Every structure is written in C-alpha cells, then in structure tokens.
Amino acid sequence: MDSDAPPGPSPLRKVGVRVASALTAFLTALFVLWAGMPLLAPVFLALSGVAIFEYAAMMRLRGVRVPRTGLVVMTVLTLPAAVPAGHPLAWPYGGMPAREVLLMGFLLALLAGAIRSPRRDALPGIAYGLLGYLWIPYAFSYVLTLRLSPDPYVGMATLLFPVLAIVASDVGGWAVGSTLGRRPLAPVLSPDKTIEGALGGVALAALVVPLAAWGLATAGLGPTLHPLAALAFAMLVAAVAMLGDLFESLIKRWAGVKDAGVFLPGHGGVLDRLDSHLFGLPAAFLLYQLIGWV
C-alpha cells in the first residue's frame, strides 16, 4: 500500500462542494427565470442538447443507437411549439397542437428511417429515440410554457412555484434521508433514498410553496393562490418529481452507470440535475390547467 498517496476529500468537504454547487445552480436558475425568454430559450436549448448527448451515450453502452442529430433538431423545433400563441417565437400555425404534431412527425421520421435502412437494432432505436424526445426536450419544454403562462409577468410565479417544489423536495429528501432515513424507498433502483427522506421532501415543499405564494401575492408580484390549493400543488409536484428522479435511476441502472455525466461537482450530469424537473414541470402544467390558472 502506498503510504504517500494523498488522502481523498473528507465527507464534510464533499457535502460542502455539493451544497455550494446546488446553491450556485439555484441562484443561476432564479436569475434565468427572472430574465425570461432572452436567457431561458438559449438555456433550454443548451441543457436539452447536453442531456440528449448524455442520454445517447448511456444508450450506446447497451448497444442502442438513437438519432442524436434528429433529437437536437427536434429540440430546436420544440422551442416555438412550447411558446403560447401571440409570442414572437410562437408556432406560426395557430390552432394546431404544436407539440403533438411534432411528436407524430418525429415518430413517422423514425419509422421511415428504420424502413429505409433496416438494422437489427431498428426497433430499439425507434423506441428509445421516441423516449429520448418525450423525456428530454418535450417534457423540459414546459419550462418555456410555464414561464409565459398566462402572461410573461405572472409567468414568473407560474414557473417559480413548481421549481421551488422540486428543489425543496430534493433538499428536504436529502437532508431528512441522510439524517433520519431508515426504510428504503426503492432499494433496487436507488439504495440511498428512503421513505423518511421522501416524506421530508414533500413536507418541505408543502412549507415553501404556500409561503412563496403568499409572499408574492402580498407584494403584488403574483396571483392569489388559495393556501390549500398551494399546499396540494406543492405536495403533488414534489411527489411526481421524485418519480422523475427514480425513473432516471432506472435508466442509469439499465445502462450500468452511476451518473449520466459530469456537469456540477457532486451532482453528476445535466440529466442528473433535470430528472425531477422533467416529470415535475409537465405535472405542474396539468395541475394549473385543472385549477384554471393557465
């Protein structure tokens, strides 16, 4: 054994790096959210592009080829499809369900490509190519829809509430799970996650979002959201966001990797940071529609 080998980073240092990275990412996200489309649109394209390459790399580890270029093109096309009508970047054909049209077009393109150049992995390529589009740019595009719904002014609160619920569920789950966690939540997929951590994450989201909704409404920066509606919204979005985290764990376990990539120290790749949002943001949009907000 080499006694001169430098010692590894201490657990306290690892926690410090993780917290510092998370805080930096959260503050940056808040600034982008406040700035709106001038920053949010390029950030959407950049993060989606990196996430697609991470996804394609994991698929290659299992011998599945997905159309990276096609997924990047679809990401660019999804941007105007996600923007509400009337915005300068909006889909030019009013009245058409833009995202659904793109989804069907991409599926037909995958089928046509497989028929034109049949390979043994053609069917897995179609299935995982379609999954890649639905999971990454299609789901993540709701960050644009929410930011502009029902208008660019109120849209800041519309997007802020699910982002707070998702971040709170992550922070609360990690804090409670690492200190009080005993019973595993999904021992095969993610041994470190516990039922206690999940409950802690939902509880923190249920605390943060109603307070934020009350504070913004009081300051005149957002609409009035009934406390019970804010509570139910926060808990549902937090729970769905955790499913997104576990779904990515399923993909990573299938691919045989620990992290999807390297993006933030202590946090893995872009997909590792977006996984909860890719489930939580579309769920938030559906909940808003149920209460008639957007």
Image (cartoon, helix red, strand yellow):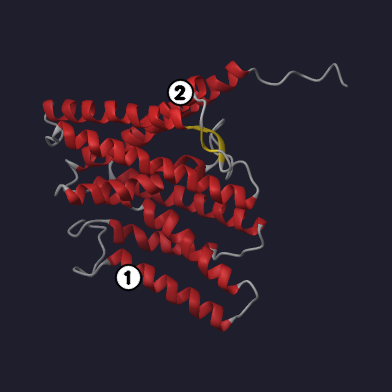
Nearer to us in this view, 219 or 185? 185
Q: What residue lies at 21% left-to-right and 43% top-to-bottom? A: 155
Q: Dividing the picture into quarters, in which one does residue 262 lie? A: top right
Seen from this angle, which residue lies furthest front?
183
Which tag is nearer the camera, tag 2 or tag 1?
2
- The residue labelled by disc 1 is 101
x, y percent for residue 252: 58, 48
Decide: few, some or many residues near mark 2? Use Cα within 10 Å; few <14, some 14-19, many ≥20.
some
Tell me the residue that label 2 is attached to: 175
Horizontal side of 164 relative to 247 (left or right) equals left
Spot the residue most to the right: 1
Residue appearing at x 26%, y 64% in the figure? 91
Residue at horizontal 21 percent and vertical 47 percent from the top: 288
Q: Extreme bottom residue here?
A: 116
Can you give x and y, in whole percent of width and height, for residue 173 in the image?
A: 44, 29
Q: Is residue 5 visible?
A: yes
Nearest the eye: 117 or 94: 117
Q: Quadrant of residue 116?
A: bottom right
CA–CA distance in space, label 2 to label 1: 42 Å
Query: Is 21 situated left or right of 13 in this image?
Result: left
Judged left or right of residue 156, residue 130 is right
